[in-house]
Amino acid sequence: MWKLTRPGNKHDKLTRDNLLDLEDHHLVRIESVQEDQRQVWVLTKRGHSEAKRLLEPKGIRVSVLREAKYDPDTGELLGTGYDDHAAAVTSTAAELHRAGIGHRLGFQTEIGHRLGNSFVQRADLMVRAPMSGVPVLLVEVDRRTEDAHELVQKLCRYWEWGRLLPSGADKRTVDLVRSRPDAIETVDHERRLWRRFYPPTGREGLPPVAFVFADTTEAKVANTVAVLEEAGRRYWAPRRYDTFERGITALDYGQAVPVVVTTLKQLHEHGADGAVWRRLGRKGEQTLTAALNNPDGDALYRHQMARADERAAQRQAAEREAQRPVCKRCGRRFTDDRWEETTARGGAWTAGDLSVCGTCHADDVAREQAARLQAAVPRPLEDDREPAGPGRGLFRRRG
């Protein structure tokens, strides 16, 4: 709590005093004390109700209540087996907050995601850090108490949850998805269930998932990540775009769950804003935003398709130019207008000689018009006889 709420303080006195005050009002309680003397504080039932009343109207979901259960014989507090895990989750949130990734009210724990079979997949931590380029991040903290294949199953459930439709969805869409499950891939993310709970990620695909490993060795982490990467490929891996265009190397991340991995030790030593995150399917470690980005995704696809369209237009233009007719009289190529005139339906009636260009056709038209004008001019009389004069009538007097 100290690291999360007062990351700049070197001492926890202020946080401890506030917790003690809340304890006096029966809003929080100490669940256990760790070996290093760290105390695990949780909300009481009363505190949980007040937190819901204060936070849920602001759109902040409150984690489930951790009820205090005691052994009926010994009176010992039960249900503390997850204390180390809870401490690791809080430490992860604290490291993210210390690096400026997320406001303290942007962290929520034990957030449920109900699947179609009513199974609820709970995220250890949900982070909202839009100012840091991470609108939403679901975090699973593993202390190597779970088998690697169990983590693959968790990833599968997040993938399945991201493909669900909300209640009240369009009936035609519901029927289509029921009859053909892959049809959900044609449904825009804005119309899916997950968008009712989380904002747009700002990137392709489903809400991203981070696996943070704590209290374990590097060898175990490496083995677990190898299994997660191979067995979970269907859920995190992008696909090839369905196109016959050559030169398209971009990948389609639209149906994938972006998955990043790191360790709590790395977060503590280098900071959550450092290059400590590895994206499944990539080599090397990056910053969180760089690991979540898809430089070979949709943006590259649009760029490559634009280039492909440009090349196709150039090829079509070259092919058309090669087919452009040549005037048999002067040897010049037809203009577009003359070409269209000689090939248009019914154009042959007015196009004249189809084998000549527009200029030669215009010369032909001019000659024809000149000939018509000349033919229309009236001709002079052609009677060369001498006109009759006095005494030269038709019937002359005889002497």
Image: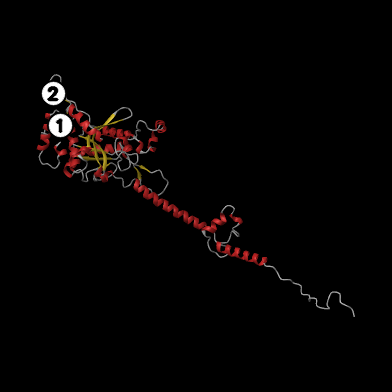
Residue type at numbered disc 1 = Trp
Determine which quarter of the picture holds residue 55: top left
66 lies above or below 317: above
Residue drawn at 10 percent across, 37 percent down: 14
Determine which quarter of the picture holds residue 36: top left
Residue type at numbered disc 2 = Glu
Q: Which residue is mark 2?
A: 76
Q: Which mark is residue 41?
A: 1
Q: Of helix, strand and loop, which one carries label 1? A: strand
Q: Which mark is residue 366?
A: none
Q: Could you tell me if residue 34 is visible in this image? A: no
- Residue 282 on image: x %, y %: 28, 44
User: Between residues 285 and 298, which one lies in front from this camera angle?
Assistant: 298
Q: Which one is earlier in the sequence, the residue at label 2 or at label 1?
A: 1
* Applied colour scheme: secondary structure
Query: Counting other residues with Cα less than 10 Å from the Cα at mark 1, is it few (<14), some (14-19), or many (20 or more)?
Result: some
